[in-house]
Image: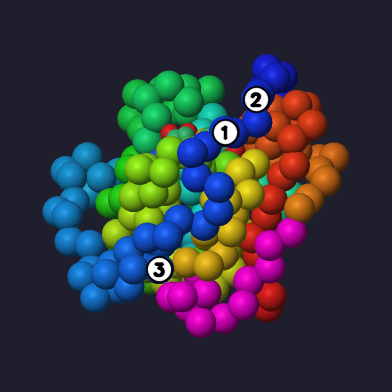
Amino acid sequence: MTMSIKSSVITSNQSSVHKDLESGIKKHLVNPFRKPYRLFSKEIFHKANKVINDLNLPIVLDSGCGTGESSYILSKKNTDVLIVGIDKSEKRLDKFISNDNFYYRDNLILMRADLIDIWRMIKQSNWIIKKHYILYPNPWPKKNQLKRRWHGHPIFPEMIGLCDQIELRTNWKIYAEEFKQALEIVIQKKYLLDSIKVKDFISPFEKKYSDSKQILYRIISYV
Ligand SMILES: C[S@@+](CC[C@H](N)C(=O)[O-])C[C@H]1O[C@@H](n2cnc3c(N)ncnc32)[C@H](O)[C@@H]1O
């Protein structure tokens, strides 16, 4: 992993869990997200679905996988599962994907796609998701950006219904606290928030924040 640019600590005009978090989640629980799927999302999902059905392996999702390096590392560490990395960025997956938005080799699949569509399609599929990683999501730290954070978005209840074993890593403590609270509101089960010291980085952003001596937070399920 070559990325070694120093990163500054997140600053925000928000000093604790957002006051609208709970009401927003309760609203999203009673009004499921129904935005129609985009055509390109359907195409890429069908491509992946065909491979996944043929392989019939348990899956570990790496949502917002950036360059795909974290998915690659996870695939080497967990050879008994299929790692599925998804990112919408045009540029980030270039190392693996050329022009068909899809990569498959050994136990690794990478897709260029929008999670907002793909998560809902996965939910309706018969994929067996063993674990779901969300590594260093964009924090959207301004107070008025709550709805852009995953737990403030109407997709959240659908997304956490994909799998019990969810692991989020972030360098912004408030994001971790909000995500934990959001999970506990929807799933009514306790999650652990801890800080981690990593030697074997699993993603480029993890390396960048670690190199900058930032504290890294993690949310995992107790089970
Ligand atoms: C801060 S980067 C972290 C990348 C990687 N997980 C890492 O730790 O190095 C967040 C990533 O989430 C992706 N992302 C954000 N919203 C997305 C969406 N709706 N669908 C797919 N990817 C998304 C971005 O393109 C970006 O690559």
Q: Are marks 2 and 3 in contact (CB under 8 Å)?
A: no
Which label is found at residue 28? Answer: none
From the viewer's perspective, is residue 70 above or below residue 123?
above
Give how far across and how far down residue 51 sits, in percent: 41, 53
Report whether the residue tagged 1 is closer than 8 Å to ligand 1: no
Please identify the quarter of the rendering in which residue 166 is found.
bottom right
Please say whether residue 76 is one of the residues in the magenta stretch: no
- Residue 5 is situated, as x and y percent measured from the top left of the image, at 68, 17
Residue annotated with mark 2? 8
Q: Amino acid under label 2?
A: Ser
Q: Is residue 62 left or right of residue 207?
A: left
Please tell me which residue is depicted at 56% across the width and 65% down the height of the picture.
180
Q: Specify the label residue 22 is tagged with.
A: 3
Q: Quadrant of the C terminus?
A: bottom right
Q: CA distance from mark 1 to mark 3?
A: 23 Å
The region drawn magenta spans 183-194
| Proximity of marks 1 and 2: CB atoms separated by less than 8 Å | yes
Q: Quadrant of the N terminus?
A: top right
126 left or right of 171 in image: left
Which numbered marker is on residue 11? 1
- Residue 189 on the magenta span: yes
